[in-house]
């Protein structure tokens, strides 16, 4: 019996699993951009040992789409431009990785629906944020959210520290927005400190967030333990675990009692169990 290549191909494709959806953190606040949704995507391109190039399926697809808005969020009008691409998506709410006190707020709420009580905990809570690469995405929505809440309520000065890990200064995402925050007066600054860490700034040397954290150990310990800060970590699984271990080391070093590594890790575990330490991991 002669084999039919069409049947064989059909059976082969039937055995292949369907392409799984890609999940990206939303990098905009619906209060700040009520009619838009922003995501931050690292375009993945790898070279195999044999020299062939493999592209990330979803990230490269998104890169090739035709946008409706320019980089400064202005609608593109051109008689010769292609029609904007349409991309299928769905929203999976994450009540876990939100600003303190916002776990119960719904995504379709408008700023005028927020009560002053709703704004108190996010604005009064010290925050430590650790972003690796495109892990800065949810933190952009954080500082936009805080800016909106500050317009509704009186300004409260609390510590909000952001560590950002990227390869080089040119790879720093939202550099202009971050510079605008730095340029604000200290009394009205959304983030009290922004600490960039460049892992490939100098040839032959590598530096990561967890290593730089030791240089700020007293500041981190003070905000974390003495000011009861909330901690947010976003990045690859390994980088998040490394940052978590670095936090435990800082607690062990700075605690007035001589803690063991296990005792320091138990404090980290308690912070996670009580919702004061939250991780958004990928990869």
Image (cartoon, helix red, strand yellow):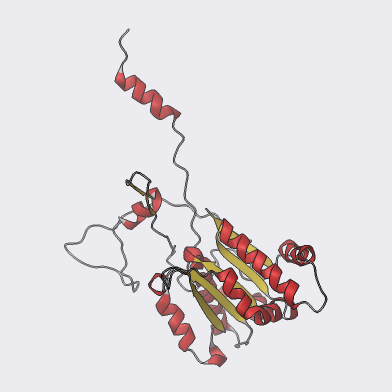
Residue furthest front in the image: 204
The N terminus lies in which quarter of the figure? top left
Left or right of 65: which side holds 153?
right
- Where residue 193 appears, as percent x and y from the top left, is 55, 82
- Where residue 179 appears, as percent x and y from the top left, is 44, 82
Question: At x 62% / y 87%, what residue is drawn?
Answer: 157
Residue 79 visible in this rendered orientation of the protein: yes
Q: How many tags in the picture?
A: 0
Residue furthest left in the image: 80
Residue furthest top in the image: 1
Q: For residue 233, what is the image quadrant?
A: bottom right
Question: At x 65% / y 68%, what residue is drawn?
Answer: 246
Question: At x 72% / y 80%, what residue is drawn?
Answer: 227
- Where residue 85 appears, as percent x and y from the top left, is 31, 55
Left or right of 43: which side holds 261?
right
Q: Front-most of 201 and 93?
A: 201
Q: Front-most of 118 and 87?
A: 87
Q: For residue 169, what is the image quadrant?
A: bottom left
Residue 114 visible in this rendered orientation of the protein: no
- Where residue 214 appears, as percent x and y from the top left, is 63, 75
Q: Front-most of 123 and 7?
A: 7
Question: At x 22% / y 58%, what residue is drawn?
Answer: 82
Left or right of 170: which side holds 84?
left
């Amino acid at each position: 019996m002669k084999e039919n290549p069409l049947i064989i191909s059909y059976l082969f494709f039937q055995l292949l699993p369907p392409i799984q959806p890609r999940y990206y953190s939303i990098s905009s606040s619906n209060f700040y951009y009520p009619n838009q949704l922003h995501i931050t995507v690292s375009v993945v391109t790898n070279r195999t040992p044999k020299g062939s190039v493999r592209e990330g399926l979803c990230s490269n697809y998104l890169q090739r789409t035709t946008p409706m808005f320019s980089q400064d969020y202005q609608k593109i009008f051109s008689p010769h431009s292609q029609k904007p691409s349409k991309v299928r998506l769905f929203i999976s709410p994450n009540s876990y990785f939100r600003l303190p006190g916002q776990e119960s707020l719904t995504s379709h709420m408008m700023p005028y629906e927020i009560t002053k009580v709703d704004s108190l905990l996010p604005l009064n809570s010290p925050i430590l944020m650790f972003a690796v690469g495109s892990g800065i995405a949810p933190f952009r929505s954080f500082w936009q959210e805080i800016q909106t809440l500050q317009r509704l309520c009186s300004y409260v000065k609390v510590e909000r520290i952001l560590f950002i890990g990227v390869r080089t200064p040119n790879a720093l995402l939202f550099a202009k927005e971050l510079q605008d925050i730095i340029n604000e007066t200290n009394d009205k600054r959304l983030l009290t400190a922004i600490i960039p860490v460049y892992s490939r700034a100098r040839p032959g040397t590598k530096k990561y967030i967890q290593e730089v954290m030791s240089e700020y150990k007293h500041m981190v310990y003070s905000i974390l333990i003495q000011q009861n800060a909330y901690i947010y970590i976003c990045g690859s699984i390994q980088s998040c675990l490394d940052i978590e271990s670095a936090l435990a080391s800082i607690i062990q070093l700075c605690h007035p009692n001589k803690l063991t590594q296990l005792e320091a890790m138990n404090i980290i575990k308690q912070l996670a169990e009580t919702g004061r330490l939250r991780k958004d991991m990928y990869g």
